[in-house]
């Protein structure tokens, strides 16, 4: 083996070792985030949502909020409320006075669902440490996630973790076409006093209010 070949071998080994160490560090941090998220009885998040498609020169900004308890959630965004009770998804559109009801099938829902927005990374992704940034006095560590499935519609995801709280601060998803979707957390509250009926859809109430009930299944 020549000196040049030996040096290349050592360099390759060092590069692989560094990448492996970064992946381990990223996984350790994500495990901390996951453990903390699962320790809460419920979570309420206020967020900004930005869609950016530079190819079509489209940018859309909006605000929203979501309340999570185990798999259940209530999501409010763009004037629409979506409720998931563990079995069905109820999409309520006051502007149209319409409710659409569809059963949830996890095999058909491959994307990042609201229920999994804080834990989706646990399966199906490779990890690498990204940049460490200071945002409004907070240290945000970014982790780059790449789908293990080469045919996935998602190109990559940057997940920003607040190093003090171990909470998710930002999620930047980029798809194969280059369109990015950014969720930035403005408020992260836990163990709130919520109604037992928060995730229960009252069909009779909406019928009496004149809503059209559209059942897809």
Image (spheres, rainbow, N blue to C red):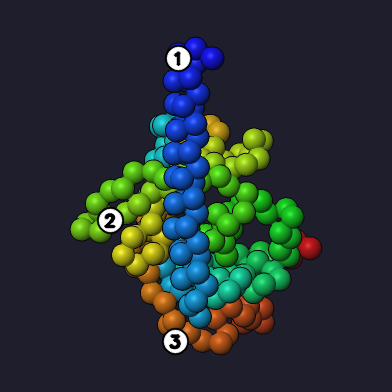
Residues at discs 2 and 3 in contact (Cβ within 8 Å):
no
Q: How many marks?
A: 3
The residue where tag 1 is placed is: 3
Q: Is residue 141 visible?
A: yes
Q: Is residue 192 above or below residue 116?
A: below
- Left or right: 64 in relation to 38: left
Rendering quarter of residue 109: bottom right
| Dot 3: element | loop
| Dot 1: element | helix
The x and y percentages for residue 189 are 38, 74
The residue where tag 3 is placed is: 193
The x and y percentages for residue 101 are 69, 66
Q: Residue at x 46, y 45 (%)?
A: 21
The residue where tag 2 is placed is: 139
- Left or right: 104 in relation to 172: right
Circle 2 Cα neighbour tier, 10 Å, few/some/many (<14 / 14–19 / ≥20): some
């Amino acid at each position: 083996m020549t000196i040049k070949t030996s040096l290349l071998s050592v360099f390759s080994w060092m590069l692989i070792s560094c990448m492996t160490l970064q992946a381990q560090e990223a996984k350790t941090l994500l495990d901390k985030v996951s453990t903390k998220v699962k320790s809460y009885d419920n979570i309420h998040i206020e967020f900004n949502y930005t869609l950016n498609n530079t190819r079509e020169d489209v940018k859309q900004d909006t605000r929203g909020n979501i309340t999570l308890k185990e798999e259940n959630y209530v999501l409010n965004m763009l004037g629409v409320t979506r409720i998931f009770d563990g079995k069905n998804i109820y999409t309520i559109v006051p502007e149209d006075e319409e409710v659409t009801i569809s059963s949830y099938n996890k095999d058909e829902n491959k994307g990042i669902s609201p229920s999994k927005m804080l834990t989706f990374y646990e399966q199906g992704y490779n990890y690498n440490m990204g940049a460490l940034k200071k945002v409004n006095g907070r240290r945000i560590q970014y982790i780059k996630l790449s789908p293990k499935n080469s045919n996935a519609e998602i190109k990559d995801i940057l997940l920003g973790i607040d190093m003090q709280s171990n909470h998710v601060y930002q999620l930047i998803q980029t798809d194969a076409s280059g369109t990015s979707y950014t969720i930035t957390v403005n408020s992260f509250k836990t163990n709130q006093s919520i109604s037992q009926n928060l995730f229960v859809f009252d069909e009779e109430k909406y019928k009496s209010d004149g809503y059209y009930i559209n059942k897809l299944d």
